[in-house]
Amino acid sequence: MAGRIRQSDVEEVKARTNIADIVGDYVSLKSAGVGSMKGLCPFHDERSPSFHVRPQVGFYHCFGCGESGDVYSFLQKMDHVTFAEAVERLAGRIGFELRYEDGGAAPEQGNRARILAANTAAEEFFTQRLSSPDAEIGRRFLGERGFDAAAATLFGVGFAPKSWDELTNHLRSRGFSTEEITASGLVSSRDGGGVYDRFRGRLVWPIRDVTGQTIGFGARRLLDDDKGPKYLNTPETPVYHKAQVLYGLDLAKREISRSQRVVVVEGYTDVMACHLAGVTTAVATCGTSFGVDHIKVLRRVLGDDSGVGEVIFTFDPDAAGQKAAMRAFTEERRFAAQTYIAVGPEGLDPCDLRLQRGDAAVQRMIDTKKPMFEFMIRQVLSRYDLETVEGRVSALRAAAPVVAEIRDPSLRPGYTRELARMLGMDLPEVTRAVASGHSTQAAQPTTQQTRAASRAGEQGAGADELQVHTESGPTLFELQTDPGTRLERDALMALLQYPALVGTELAQRAVHSGFDNSTLAVVRDGIAGCLDALESADWLTRVMAEVPAAFGTLVRELAVAPIPERSERELTAYVRGVASALVDKDLTRRKRELLGQLQRADAGDRDAYNTLQRALMQVEAERRSLREE
């Protein structure tokens, strides 16, 4: 019977794992203050970052959609793995050997893990076969396109032998069942039963996800008697979804995030050529057109919220390329980054351009990019006869909405003048047509614009601006904004995020302070109930277990919300200062109450009067002591 992973090991793996490193494989994270990171949420589409990660407490939370959790839940949601698979993956990442309860063996790996393992074994098989005699045609194909053995190794290019079962037999010898091989998409089913190798006599590229795991393959036809498509990809599997995959992203993601530039090309060899030529932000779709899901992936990696990034598309000049450019243009508004089109001289794609004119020519092609709007305007005008009045009027009607869609209002007048020049028409006439198109656009906002507007003001750097709507329990958004509530909120954030800096003694005084906000008082009581675990690795988990379930979201938000940005040196002073201010507020309230009691006390009852005086002196002493710390 499969054993359960020991809870102590689960906690140890989590303690040794920096959640920002794991999330950073999927999302470009930027500093949001000391100990806080933020980026575009991977669980919903958004224009401004509302997804926050706190490595100090090991949690993430999105203030836009409410998704939150630890490093295990993040992997479970992103990669659709079980809890045990998430623990085992992270344990393997840090080289930690897991132990299982009751002396049981490690549980059987889930379907996803076995598919990934089968793909890894297949990749090794393909790369080894590239050096075999029958792979000469594949090596020649690479050589003719300027790729040597080092390039093939860098990109993991391999060769699938012209055999019906060589790969199948190899995988079976490695312990994979027919069901697992079939689920991986490496084989196809025969009509009469049984399976056969999907890729035969082809050059093979491994397709990897953003973390570098091989999730599928793309195979190029080489032989004249191969009647299949020019490129054959892995079919949809539990780990491979072509609409969400970008070839080369595992190699390009760091540079994309750093430079805030991505180059979208059309094929595997174009990606290779760009990277080898120094354009290391190149990626390509895999057997499908560039779509909305690809945009979501790129926006997260780009950190696409500032509008300063660049997305550069390269398309072949043929009809298919023009159609692809039009599709990309229809989705252009989903980017905050500026979009461009790069076309090689004489219509050469990056691979042929590098082969014929060298690496520098590929770099020049990218550097001499044209704004996508300029490219699309010219494409629209090319469909009309501008030598006739009728043609010019029709062209204006078609091109004016394109200019009207330009997001940056400072660019729109310049493109309006350029359109008037191209058409040879009076500027006022063209301006009216563009204005009419802009009015139509404004009257019918896109779904994306509507969503962005609904989130306006939600993603600031301060906790006051962090908002979320949920029916599951209280949230930061629902708190009052009076000074007293803000102080109580900030003190709880300090206690949850930096308990060790606050210290046990001050924390005890803070959680025994009176709270005006009854919602925050519940969280305070939860903290008070587990002060013995103040500096433990599972501190936040213990607090969440102590509060009612409906308050879990509020605790996570308080644990992840950005503390006002300060230097590391000032952080201790801040968190202790805000906790002390909470205690001082409570002492001030007690002083006020004692003074009131003194005013109402019977002057003849000396014992009661003296007791109140001593209590008042004690409060004053505590306040002085607090301020001297």
Image (cartoon, grey):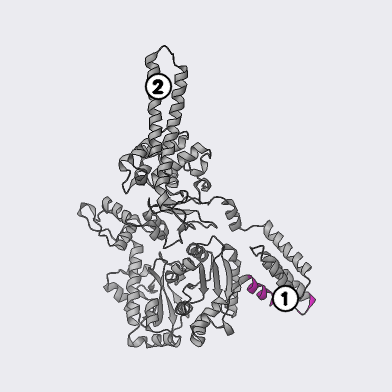
Picture residue at 52% right of the left edge, 39% below the top = 480
User: What is the residue that sits farthest to the top in this orientation?
Assistant: 604
State the image coordinates of residue 548 (x, y, percent, origin top left): 40, 39
Depth order, front residue of 554/198? 554
- In the depicted structure, whether residue 367 falls above or below residue 462: below
**How far separated are the C-alphas under marks 1 and 2?**
89 Å
Task: Using the rendered image of the protein, determine whether residue 555 is visible from the camera's viewpoint.
Answer: no
Picture residue at 60% right of the left edge, 57% below the top = 449
- In the depicted structure, whether residue 36 falls above or below residue 302: above
The three-letter code of the residue at mark 2 reads: Gln
The three-letter code of the residue at mark 1 reads: Met
Mark 1 or 2, which is nearer the eye?
2
Q: Is residue 78 left or right of residue 363?
A: left
Q: Quadrant of residue 94?
A: bottom left
Residue under label 2: 613
State the image coordinates of residue 163 (x, y, percent, origin top left): 35, 82
Q: Is residue 129 left or right of residue 337?
A: left
Q: Mark 2 Cα within 10 Å, few/some/many (few <14, many 20+)?
A: some
Q: Mark 1 Cα within 10 Å, few/some/many (few <14, many 20+)?
A: some
User: Mark 1 falls on what kind of element?
Assistant: helix
Picture residue at 53% right of the left edge, 38% below the top = 482
Q: Quadrant of residue 384?
A: bottom right
Asked whether 66 falls inside the magenta stretch, the response is: no
State the image coordinates of residue 445 (x, y, percent, origin top left): 64, 57
Asked whether 384 falls inside the magenta stretch, the response is: yes
State the image coordinates of residue 627 (x, y, percent, origin top left): 41, 37
- In the depicted structure, whether residue 351 falls above or below residue 459: below
Depth order, front residue of 213/61? 61
Which disc is residue 422 wearing?
A: 1
Magenta-tinted stretch:
373-389
User: Mark 2 falls on what kind of element?
Assistant: helix
